Image (cartoon, coloured by chain):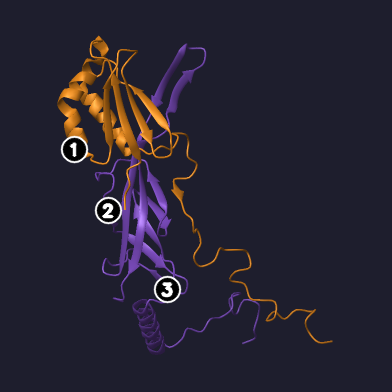
Chain colours: A purple, B orange
Amino acid sequence: VAKTSLTSPPWPEVKLPDPVEEAKHHAEVVRKVNAMIAAGHYGRLFAVVHFASKQWKITSEDLIMMDNVLEAECGDRIRMEKVLLVGADDFTLIGRPLLGKELVRVEATVIEKTESWPKINMRFRRRHNYQRKKIIVHPQTVLRINTIEIFPSL
Amino acid sequence: RYVRQLQRLQLLFSPTAADSRGARQFVEEEALDFARQNPDVVLYVSPRAGPAPVLLAEYMNGTVREELIASKTSEEIKQLATKLAGQSGLDIIRIRKPFHTDNPSIQGQWHPLTNKPSALTVQGPRLQPQ
């Protein structure tokens, strides 16, 4: 049959590798990464954490602020679960969707619990002599991420 | 390592005025409990005959905040005191970003040339030998 412009799809044809070889390759990569973690060949770690209905990309010693009240007092250490991703300079560990608790440990301290700046909530309707003004101040919490640790339990 | 940012709490009130009744009750009942619960805050109580009663809070970066406690119950003063104890001395203005990092990128910041093949491997009309 003659080859026309529609015999083969326009994208380049990709040959998938052998599944057995792929599995061996995967296992070897996992073992290498495990060895690297166990030996400690990583510098700074960053993590993506789901906290207070938001996802944050955090490293150690950085500040995060949320618009709610946590039940912890100032100065309490908090361990964050729900870690989605952990990465270093050479490798990243991606969770589906979460990583195990034996793998990662993210610790944070509550630094301060303040209130936000006074926000103005005003409602106005023209020509109807209707205006309402309300000042809203809501509480905030500031956390500092102390450490992110990983353990070689892949 | 957590260091409370509040240095001093000064409670200035007058022993006779009517609007510092809550302050006097707070001093009698709850000041000791408050001082014991927050041992790293120094609480000064000084009665003076002057204007309205005031709660002064000094923080470690030098900012001083005054809060009026005239005609407030001792419970409200206690809540105010705990709130001030939890704050730090930064100005309460609009903050643009809810996060702050000193090292924003670990694996290298993205620029439009990452993940692109370098010029040596590209076969173009200029690089071919003529």
Q: Amino acid at mark 1?
A: Arg
Residue topped by disc 1: B36
Which residue is more in the foreground, B47 or B17? B47
Q: Tell me residue A28's x, y (percent).
A: 38, 86
SS class, disc 1: helix
Q: Residues within 10 Å of mark 3 (few under 14, many from 20)?
A: some
Task: Count the numbered circles shown.
Answer: 3
Q: Are marks 2 and 1 on the same chain?
A: no
Relative vertical location of residue B70 with respect to residue B41 in this rendering, above or below: above
The answer for which chain carries disc 2 is A
Local SS, label 3: loop
Q: Is residue A96 something that shows in the picture?
A: no
Amino acid type, residue under disc 3 in the picture: Tyr
Q: Which residue is mark 3?
A: A42
The chain carrying label 3 is A
Q: Circle 2 is placed at which residue position? A: A77
Q: Are marks 3 and 1 on the same chain?
A: no
Could you say where residue B101 lies in the image, as x and y percent from the top left? Answer: 47, 54
Residue A14 spot, x, y in % from top left: 53, 81
User: Based on the displayed image, in which of its 4 quarters is residue A99 positioned?
Assistant: bottom left
